[in-house]
Amino acid sequence: MNAIHTCSQETGIYYKGMEVPWSVNRAELPRDNSLFSSCRHSSGPVSSPSLTMSNPWAKGGGWISVLISGLAVQITILLLWMLLRRFPSSTIYDIGSLITGRFLGKVLALAYVGYFLMVGGTVLVRAAGIINKWILPQTPRWALVSLVAAAAIYLGRGNLRTVARYYVLISFLIPFFGLLILYGYSDVDFSYIFPIGEAGWANIAKGATETVTAMYGFELLLFVYPFVEGKSGGKLKAVSLAVWFVTLFYTFVTLTGLIFFSPEGIQYIPEPVLYMLMTFQVGVVDRADQIFLSIWFPNVTASIISYIYAGANGLGYLFHRGNHKKAIFYAALICLVISLIPQTPAHVDRLSKIVDQLTFVFIGGLPVLLLLLAVLLRKKGGKAC
């Protein structure tokens, strides 16, 4: 049986007797759900800060679709956790080699690198599009995405603890989302969501499949799991709390939009929450949507940095003997190029649909297949020191 183990040092992961310098102190990364909740909170509202409130199938039951999607994410997290706890000191980059052999493992690792960077590029282009539309219409998109890529390089050259500190810092902004959205309850009509099952439960469940792909972020568990302190049960609890915190927040946002806009009107509004906030005045600020976006964008940046960091570590694992600092530059460059490829909203939507399909493969399909192989072949990794 192939076994790996870790020690609490910066260069402390060993695979088949060879040291893999991941540049992260595993013992110093706390078991904190801010990393997972911040990432999911920023990557969910990429197409609009209101998620998918104008779901064509679920109609007034769109908020139920969000809850169902949260349950689907929780089940997926449980499957990922079952795989990761068999290899407590390994990331997804190691696990493929431990189960399928070195060659297929390297191919799998490269595929996950491509997936992480493609998701990061998609989040980046959609976020830049919203900022262009609502705040900086005269600023070229390449300037916006370049600034975010530069921030990713700056933070990504450090270890995972540095990135986690940034998550903790921006997590204090999250309550302000809810406070701003509460302004919408000054003019709502709850009759818009009744009768609750009007669309039919089959359509509501179909709407959940559209919503679940908006919750990017939780798949980074495949990378950060061995670097988080605590026992496996504690890690599952932390990420589960993050899942349901963000799911309930998304449900609140979705419900607010559904009772603020009429069922007919919301279908033609691309960013319902922003249009809702645009009509409100907060103190001396005429447009609350500007405040919302000022809080939202740092969260999006955190998500993009996470994907670039995960991709850079994979490239470092494959080509630089585990040194991600050499790979962070071209990982950010690849993400930047991906974000510049779509030139029209239709192209952006097409890229998003491709990533949505890949999400089911890389989060649902491949980890479950690896778990089945690990069980059948009785493969397990070593324990942390």
Image (spheres, helix red, strand yellow):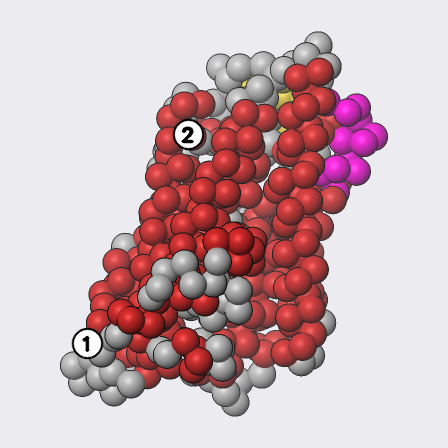
The type of residue carrying mark 1 is Ser
Secondary structure beneath label 2: helix
Left or right: where does residue 91 sit relative to residue 29? right
Q: Is residue 125 above or below residue 354?
A: below
First reached walking from the N terminus: tag 2 or tag 1: 1
How many numbered discs, if any?
Answer: 2
Residue under label 2: 235
Q: Which one is in front, 349 or 40? A: 349
Secondary structure beneath label 1: helix
Identify the magenta region: 99-110
Q: Which one is in front, 191 or 228? A: 191
Task: Give the position of the N terminus as an image quadrant.
Answer: top right
Q: Residue at x 83, y 30 (%)?
A: 103
Left or right: where does residue 312 sit relative to residue 257? right
Q: Of the numbered discs in the image, which one, if any, rests on residue 186? A: 1
- Pointers 2 and 1 in contact (CB under 8 A)? no
Question: Does 345 appear in magenta?
Answer: no
The type of residue carrying mark 2 is Lys
Q: Is residue 215 visible?
A: no
> Residue 276 appears in which quarter of the rendering?
bottom left
- Mark 2 burial class by Cα count in 10 Å: few <14, some 14-19, many 20+: many
Q: Is residue 66 above or below residue 369?
A: below
> Residue 320 appears in which quarter of the rendering?
top right
Left or right: where does residue 31 sit relative to residue 140? left
Q: Main secondary structure of the magenta part?
A: helix
Q: Residue at x 61, y 17 (%)?
A: 381
